[in-house]
Image (spheres, grey):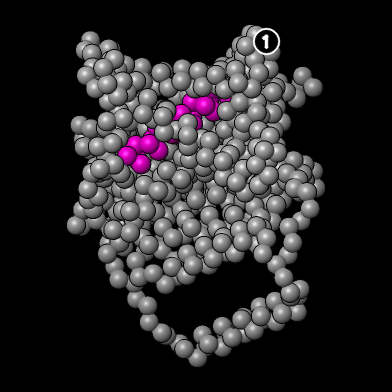
Amino acid sequence: MKEFLIDILQNEILVYVLMAAVPLVWIIPFALFAVWWERKISAHMQDRLGPMRTGGWHGWAQTIADILKLIQKEDIIPAAADRKLFNLAPYVVFVGSFAAYAAIPFSAAYVGSEINIGLFYILAVSSFVVVGLLMAGWASNNKWSLFGAMRAAAQIVSYEIPVALSLLAVVMIVGTFDLQEINRAQSGYFWNWFVFQKFPLLFVAATIYFVASLAEVNRTPFDIPEAESELVAGYHTEYGGMKFALLFLAEYANMFAVSAIAATVFFGGWNSPFGDFMSGPVWGLFWFISKGMAFIFVHMWLRWTLPRLRVDQLMYVGWKVLIPFSFVIVLGVGFWVMLAR
Amino acid sequence: MELFDIAFFVFAFITVVSAFIVVFSKSVIYSAFSLLFTFFGVAALYVLLHADFIAVTQVLIYVGGILVLMLFGVMLTNKIVNVELKTGTLHTIPALLLVSVVAGTLGGLFYSTWKGDVAPPPPPFESTTKTLGEMLMTSYLLPFEIASVLLLVALMGAAMFARRRTKT
């Protein structure tokens, strides 16, 4: 896609700007859709209807109306807040989650930057989100916000380890961090996907990744950073208007990013499940997004199914269950790869 | 000026300015947060030097690990946040001497190796990850292993201390 655009536009800088803007064009409609979708799913799981009026058909325009309202709102900064950090924090959070999209391959023809260390880069830049959350929580000068931010940071830092180790299992098989390369290694039919390879090691790795990624994006059952019943709304309690919208957008962007990594690393990414049937760059985009959305659906489904964990249970699951299991899987896959050589 | 030069100066500016804030800010929390931008700038400079793996590791270790740990330390110590840092001038003459010696050495070194321009970007980019991995597993295996054992001992020691305190 890059070479093609350079051919048309004859200007490299313009092409890079365009390439960088592509994920943004995806994130914003996705977030609008996902918020509506989440409200509909939660409503139907609780035997109600959810938004029905705005826009006519099943309230499809509800989130568009919401975002228009948010844009128009007055920009309120609490008197006791730290103004500079309070203003900066939403941007740091969003930059962190948007930067991850640079290495996510949307289709065989489009990836922001085909770097050799793609996966490692995504793991690294997501740490900007942690610092941004701490910044938001601290600058709000509110106990709930600070507690929410602290819990979020503690949780993300601990669950980064099982996430990295479970992805490492696949990296050891392919021998590269390049996500396009990982995609190409899974081409063909769906039994070539890494989740079904080296059975059952990588299946367990995929499960560990999914559970830990739920904690990384603060979703139920790991949503103690935002536990409404104790912390009001966690680190974004004091935020309103456009800044709140930005934090919310970052949250949904993160949700899609972790789902996209799960889809790419374990479920074939843009590969069609049926060999050559419906494959190609454009169908690749379709498969990639469907797989990502399937994981988003599971995120939402779990939110209305499971109760929230306590802090000690959260730490128990992270450190005493997921981490030892992922170490065993890394060792097992290592031996398997070495012996099969 | 080429694109490379512009990028270099932008990131160098970010690094230096945020490092100044780290040193001169009166509030510990501002220092800690502006370290984020220093680390980011340094990582970007590594990228410009074609050291991709080091750049990403820099972000992962320093931003994701050390900075978060420091922020936790600052935030959990409720007294630190409100303390006005004492910035006065003490021991002017020895400090001036030391600074002039260091600055003179660095300046001399800089002047003697100055080629009149920013170094041009090195030719075709090659990923360093594979080479680094191979080197660590062959030529530098012993230092690598020693470092990992040292880190393991440090981890176990830290866990021991933390546990003993909670029991009593």
Residue A36 occupies quadrant: top left
What is the number of callouts on the image?
1
Residue appearing at x 34%, y 76% in the figure: B86
Task: Specify few, some or many for label 1: CA neighbours under 10 Å numbering under 14, 14-19, or 20 or more.
Answer: few
Q: Give the range drawn in magenta.
A: A244-266
Please tell me whether mark 1 sits on a helix, a strand or a loop: loop
Q: In this view, does A291 lie to the left or right of B25?
A: right
Residue appearing at x 47%, y 31% in the figure: A26
Residue A330 visible, this angle: no
In reply to whether residue A103 is colored magenta, the answer given is no
Residue appearing at x 66%, y 47% in the figure: A11
The C terminus of chain B is located in which quarter? top left
Q: Mark 1 falls within which chain?
A: A
Residue B114 occupies quadrant: bottom right
Residue appearing at x 48%, y 40% in the figure: A98
Image coords of residue A257 (percent x, y): 49, 31
Residue A246 visible, this angle: yes
Q: Nearer the viewer, residue A52 or B108?
A: A52
From the image, tell me which residue sits under label 1.
A275
Q: In this view, does A164 lie to the left or right of A45?
A: right
Image coords of residue A213 (percent x, y): 46, 29
The N terminus of chain B is located in which quarter? bottom right
Image coords of residue A71 (percent x, y): 29, 41
Q: Label 1 is placed on what type of residue? A: Gly
Residue A68 drawn above or below residue B34: above
Q: In this view, does A330 lie to the left or right of A258?
A: right
Q: Which of A46 and A29 is in front in this view?
A: A29
Image coords of residue A198 (percent x, y): 65, 16
Magenta: main secondary structure equals helix
Work out which residue is located at the far bottom of the displayed protein and give it. Answer: B93
Q: Which of A276 and A129 is in front in this view?
A: A276
